[in-house]
Image (spheres, rainbow, N blue to C red):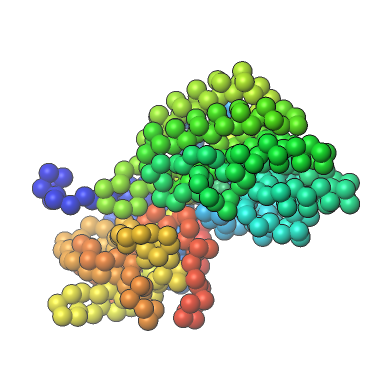
Amino acid sequence: MSEVQRSFPSHAAMDQFPVADGELVVGGMALTRLAARVGQTPFYAYDRSLLTRRVGELRAVLPSVLKLHYAMKANPMPALVCHMAGLVDGIDVASAGELKVALDAGANPRDISFAGPGKQGAELRQAVAAGILINVESFREVAELAAISAQTGNKARIAVRVNPDFELKSSGMKMGGGAKQFGVDAEQVPALLTEIGRAGLSFEGFHLFAGSQNLKPEAIVEAQSKSFDLALRLAREAPSPVRFLNLGGGFGIPYFPGEKHLDLAPIGAGLATISERAAKELPQAELVIELGRYLVGEAGIYVSRIVDRKISRGHCFLVTDGGLHHHLSASGNFGQVIRKNYPVAIGNRMAPSEREMVSVVGPLCTPLDLLADRMELAVAEAGDLVVIFQSGAYGASASPQAFLGHPACLETMV
Ligand SMILES: *Cc1c(COP(=O)(O)O)cnc(C)c1O
């Protein structure tokens, strides 16, 4: 069917993975062979060369002074974090558990930062001992860090996470602006900075993160430029010069029909303008953006095997051994308002002679366990491999694996 004839929008081409002899090729290996190597389905596979390529593509358009951090909550698999630690300039963690993985992966503590509401005393003590940067999100955290620094003689390194007075427009998930549990409201920051100065803590700068999964470059550019302006205003109240400024990220990837790959050029241009201004107005500041999904999302697939093929009142259901317990996002239950299909294919039938309209479901006893709803796929049977693309971020670790007691999925790097 040509683009003109299509009356409905299609998924962006998932051409990051080649096809050979009718099979998807992942990390240089045909999918059925990879499944044999893994030894079980379901599994997630992450392609190292795609991770490396993505970081290279970003570096090519971003100003060279800008530091690129990996927000590892998108995918905390240790081998993947290890690979990323060798490519990016820093790792952002959101718990003491993630901090351990980042340190084990060899990330330099100088370049690890820790954000998240509700950091507990024990986590703060670990963070101070590790010597990482702590993005404080409340007055309580500052008081606790002052006490820890006094007790241990190790001065806490602090940046203030600011809840901005604006929102990231068109974002899949808003995490700043209005009343939020994240960060400290911009208008309360001057008082917090006084507190930090009084406690003699090491103030390093600001962290602003407005939202996630954004496919509109102009919205991202606007949020980053407003973030920079806000940081400039707040810097006047700071106890020492700003040495670190994290402008967030929120770069999205195409999941659903009609969505396109993010155009990086305007974002690169916007960040170039910001870094020129920063060189004059905040000359000691290291500029950082932090990305999770954009770095890893497109490099991963989720693979399950068809267990059964059933026809119910004329509609075909492919029942697989994988489902929402491993991949909550693809089922549409991870923050989505309206359920839409991820890009899906029968990975061992990439050059089919026939296609049909089917639904792909998992083994759980709930109608929510839906991986593809009325999609046109290659005609498939039990034993074939269903691939869900765009699965490298918010997959295994963001899913309720214990729900219904099926085995956990495996994750592999290829
Ligand atoms: C979740 C999160 C990120 C990563 O968001 P992505 O949309 O995956 O890029 C970055 N920074 C903070 C503070 C976060 O909470």
Q: Position of residue 88 (x, y in %)?
A: 58, 40
Q: Residue furthest top?
A: 280
Q: Residue at x 41, y 70 (%)?
A: 324
In which image quadrant can residue 123 be found?
bottom right
Name the side, left or right, on which 231 lies relative to 344. right
Q: In the rendered view, would you say 274 is above or below 142?
A: above
Q: In the rendered view, would you say 217 is above or below 127?
A: above
Q: Is residue 15 visible?
A: yes
Q: Residue furthest left?
A: 5
Q: Residue at x 71, y 31 (%)?
A: 238
In which image quadrant can residue 69 be found?
top right
Q: Nearer the viewer, residue 394 or 284?
A: 284
Q: Nearer the viewer, residue 66 or 285?
A: 285
Q: In the rendered view, would you say 120 is above or below 364?
A: above
Total numbered labels? 0
Q: Nearer the viewer, residue 312 or 411?
A: 312
Q: Position of residue 132 (x, y in %)?
A: 73, 45
Q: Position of residue 211 (x, y in %)?
A: 48, 46
Q: Nearer the viewer, residue 376 or 176?
A: 176
Q: Residue at x 30, y 46 (%)?
A: 259
Q: Residue at x 25, y 75 (%)?
A: 317
Q: Is residue 28 visible?
A: no
Q: Position of residue 327 (x, y in %)?
A: 43, 65
Name the side, left or right, on which 300 lies relative to 151. left
